[in-house]
Amino acid sequence: MPVPTETDLGVRRLLAAAGQAPSIHNTQPWRFRITPNAVELLADPDRRLRTTDPRGRSLHVSCGAALFNLRLAVRVAGYRPLSWPLPDPQTDPRLLAVVHMPYAGPPTPLEQELYANIGKRRTNREPFDDRRVPSWVLADLRIAASREGANLVLLGGRGSADLLDYVAMAEGELAGDHDYLAELRAWTMRGKHRDGLPGYVLGPRPAGDSAAVRDFGTHPARPDARFERHPQIAVLTTSGDRPVDWLRAGQALQRVLLLASAHGVSASFLNQPLDLRDMRHRVDPHHRRGHPQMIIRFGYGPCVPRAPRRPPVELRTGRGLRPWPRGLPARRCGGRDRLRRGVRPQVVRLVAGQEN
């Protein structure tokens, strides 16, 4: 069996799988460089959200999700993905990971099932049913996150309600930030595009004061709808808050989402408090459950269309990208290097709720 990087078809399959990962506002901020025995994952600085994501955290989480899909595609091809994260952070911070692929034999049934759900997974911003996701499914999702070195904290009813209040407060503050709104409009547009979020994937506006979905601003075609009364919320955390932890969070996120899809469970994101934290250069205090990286809403929703994706040919690069933008550090992203002012309570208490 030839190594996937030795044939055009093998390369297309790898890049097609990697390119279907979720990303912030569907920016798809990744590129791939193919070598005879490896694939290099590079960040695309032209697709970084300079206002929403000044640290590059969301960019790294997005690329981490693409890295997991790439690893999975390598494994289904019969090879073992040996990934090396951030191999040269000082010289080339764009190079986020290198994946080597020695032969390993057939994939397991679980690996095949996860791979089959790459094309089925959707971010579902529609109202969910009021039926609850069973505890055994949530336990499976927690185990999936732990396999990638992250922690999925499942909030109870009181913790979810408190967190939704913080999401609503963050949404209100973001709505007054003109730079944020301009960036949001740039990636939520009408018409046919290969990236960004078209109107047909935004879902309805929440009726009343519900905060169960992100408000993407003024889109006339979006109707109002009432969402589930008691959303099931989880927070994905990591022990650290550096680029390597963000990559780990993205891989854990994608493993969780693919397994949720296999169970028929829908998911969407409520990351407004995390976006606001990054935009205001605030830090999280130390917490035994780690640093929040993603806020996820789980439930049972209707079938929804997929956001557009760039074709594999656009994801491949054989040359260096432009220099890493100023203001996005390669290494210095830990809590000690952040300004210690204005810590908001919504981030302090993100993981303080009871577990299910």
Image: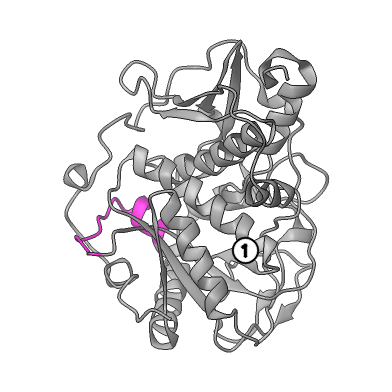
Considering the image in quadrants, where does the N terminus appear?
top right
Residue 197, placed above or below residue 286: above
Task: Count neighbours of disc 1 (C-alpha within 10 A) and say few if under 14, some if 14 to 19, many if 20 or more.
Answer: many
Q: Main secondary structure of the magenta part?
A: loop
Q: Residue 287 colored magenta?
A: yes
Q: Name the residue under label 1.
A: 260
Is 323 displayed left or right of 203 in the figure?
Answer: left
Residue 117, placed above or below residue 33: below
Q: Residue 347 colored magenta?
A: no
Front position in the image: 319 or 16? 16
Q: What element carries label 1?
A: helix
Residue 241: x percent and y percent? Answer: 30, 47
Is 190 displayed left or right of 286 in the figure?
Answer: right
Q: Which residue is drawn at 46% across and 70% down?
A: 234
Is 353 displayed left or right of 322 in the figure?
Answer: left
Furthest residue toward front: 105
Please state the extent of the stretch shown in magenta in the rendering: 274-288
Considering the image in quadrants, where does the C terminus appear?
bottom left
Choose top left, top right, bottom left or bottom right for residue 54.
top left
